[in-house]
Image (cartoon, grey):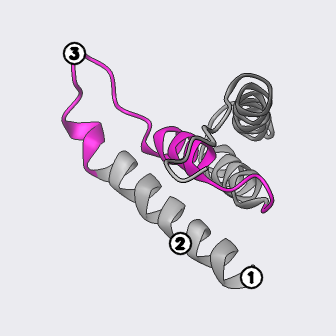
Amino acid sequence: MLKTGIGITILLCVAFLVQSSFFAHFPIYGVTPNLVLLLVLGIALFSDERYPTDIIAALAGGVILDTFSSSFFGIWIGVLLALVLGIRFFIRKYVRLSSFSIFS
């Protein structure tokens, strides 16, 4: 679990560096894409519910974005955690995996 957390943190740091150094010079319709938000969203959608990798990604991404943000510390942590917990609730409540099998 520790290796996964460190790997996610490094991946989020690289995404933030690309976001702030490369994509800042090439805005798409005047908007710079938030790669950390998209990466946390992808991790939350495709992670296993039994392991808290999406919550670790939300916390790490929030700390990274809040550290270099000009607003109050904790805004991005709250936004990303609310996003992850909302996705977890939606998947648990409304998504059901099919148990259809040819041989059953």
Residue beneath the point at 44% across and 36% down: 34
Residue sitting nearer the eye, 53 or 73: 53
Q: Residue 63's spot in the image, x, y percent? A: 71, 52
Against 8, residue 33 (above or below) is above
> Mark 1 or mark 3: which is in front?
1
Amino acid type of the residue tagged 1 in the rendering:
Leu
Q: Is residue 23 magenta?
A: yes
Q: CA distance from mark 2 to mark 1?
A: 12 Å
Numbered circle sitting on residue 2: 1
Q: Mark 1 near mark 3, Cβ–Cβ under 8 Å?
A: no
Q: In this figure, which residue is indicated by the disc labeled 2?
A: 10
Q: In this figure, which residue is indicated by the disc labeled 3?
A: 29
- The secondary structure type at the circle numbered 3 is loop
Q: Mark 2 near mark 3, Cβ–Cβ under 8 Å?
A: no
- The secondary structure type at the circle numbered 2 is helix
Against 30, residue 43 (above or below) is below
- Nearer the N terminus, badge 2 or badge 1? 1
Q: In this picture, which residue range is highlighted in magenta?
A: 22-51
Residue beneath the point at 30% across and 39% down: 24
Amino acid type of the residue tagged 2 in the rendering:
Ile
Q: Residue 16's spot in the image, x, y percent? A: 46, 53
- Nearer the N terminus, badge 2 or badge 3? 2
